[in-house]
Image (tube, rainbow, N blue to C red):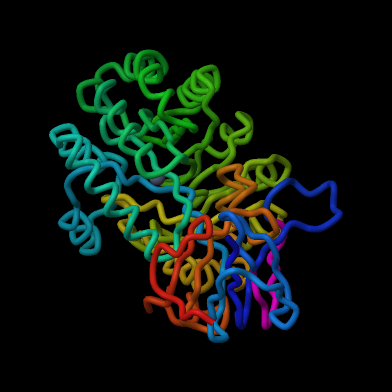
Amino acid sequence: MSTLITNIGELVTNAPDAGDDAAPAGPGRFAALADAALVVEDGRVAWTGPAARAPAADHMADCGGRAVLPGFVDSHAHLVFDGERSAEFAARMAGTPYGAGGIRSTVAATRKASDGRLRATAFRLAAEMLRQGTTTLECKSGYGLTVDDERRSVAVAAGITGEVTFLGAHVVPPEFEADPGAYVDLVCGPMLAACAPHARWIDVFCERGAFGADEARAILAAGRAAGLMARVHANQLGPGPGVLVAVEAGAASADHCTYLTAADVDALAAGATVATLLPGVEFSTRQPYPDARRLLDAGVTVAIATDCNPGSCFTSSMSLCIALAVREMRLTTQEAVWAATAGGARALRRADVGHLGVSARADLVLLDAPSHAYPAYRPGVPLVAAVWRAGELVAGAVPAA
Ligand SMILES: [Zn+2]
């Protein structure tokens, strides 16, 4: 069965650069077509081009001149938890600084919660993301921090996405405060063994107050030996070794990158590690934003994600993150939309999402707006009119043509 989605005022494709053998597989640069159409067949993009030259299809949908983007790829989220921290947020806005230790209150609540309760929260947040146009999401564990609580956290995450990240190394839990080395051994040993079957990635919070460079290296190496690929929470709360550890480990992504030295930027530019920026965190913790322009101008691949979590940033809105990236980090509207789609795909090493080139998964967002600039131009306004995932309309409605 084929569907022709037509009368698209602006179609952002990020299609792979044709004939460029040096380009990595997957999304290319920002690219958009005016007055376009797209054909979906068997859940994949089968054709894109001018609406006037569109081939016939079994079904037709009329976008009424509005814009279509690739589905957002949110490559950094923590959706498996219980409890909420609005009081901590309110205190922070009243002047209390944010520290890594706040995670521990969520850990205590998560350990007490039933599997069903954790599953219900994760599903609710994933559905909330989908309605807002996020068709691919990554989800981390990291609020269990015992073998059994981490195992059930990655199992819950695997129920909502294939991009599951084992983050036993989120923070040292209180019961290991006197012996953090023993906790690292637990993470690299029995906890990893219990979690690896449910996960694709391993992550470590490499930060003062969490895990140091040598601990992070050991954790990533153990993950790699168990078949997991690396990503790192790096340089969020201050300068530190996280970015260099990530690049050296061949991590797909170094996330946060709020405090960078020249050596960090050079390493990211020379390596294959994506810098994933999480501007909702700086917004919600009143920290300075990362210097995205410096990264982009150095040739670093930049992604934007939400970091949706109950502590440092509880937004699930990629549109808000795009608006922050444009307004606060000086990305162009094209760069921000690219970072939220193709950039996220690169951060997850996915060639099939983040773009609408032929054979990509047909993940599409129809905006109630004529151009890709609107999520930044009209911040906070719900502009997602419809969402398709793998060619199936999963949110909103579109008139048949
Ligand atoms: Zn995070």
* Residue at image coords 40%, 20%: 192
* Residue at image coords 32%, 60%: 128
| Quadrant of ligand 1 in image | top left
Q: Quadrant of the image for the C terminus?
A: bottom right
- Residue 63 against residue 107 in the figure, above or below: below
* Residue at image coords 61%, 55%: 44
- Residue 147 against residue 311 in the figure, above or below: above
- Residue 384 against residue 219 in the figure, above or below: below
Query: Where is residue 371 drawn, in percent x and y?
Result: 57, 81
Give the image quarter of residue 119: top left
Using residue 345 as the reference point, say whether residue 87 is left or right of it: left
Q: Looking at this view, is 352 or 21 the one in front?
A: 352
Using residue 181 as the reference point, say whether residue 41 is left or right of it: right
Please tell me how many numbered marks the rendered image carries.
0
In terms of secondary structure, what is the magenta stretch mainly? strand
Query: Where is residue 361 drawn, in percent x and y?
Result: 58, 54
Query: Where is residue 345 drawn, in percent x and y?
Result: 58, 50
Query: Start and end of the magenta stretch?
Result: 28-38
- Residue 146 against residue 351 in the figure, above or below: above
Q: Looking at this view, is 279 or 94 the one in front?
A: 279
Using residue 207 as the reference point, say whether residue 339 is left or right of it: right
Give the image quarter of residue 88: bottom left
Q: Looking at this view, is 238 or 330 the one in front?
A: 330
Is residue 45 rendered magenta in the image? no
Q: Looking at this view, is 383 or 214 the one in front?
A: 383
Q: Is residue 292 visible?
A: no
Query: Where is residue 343 drawn, in percent x and y?
Result: 60, 54
Q: Is residue 209 visible?
A: yes
Q: Quadrant of the image for the N terminus?
A: bottom right
* Residue at image coords 42%, 23%: 197
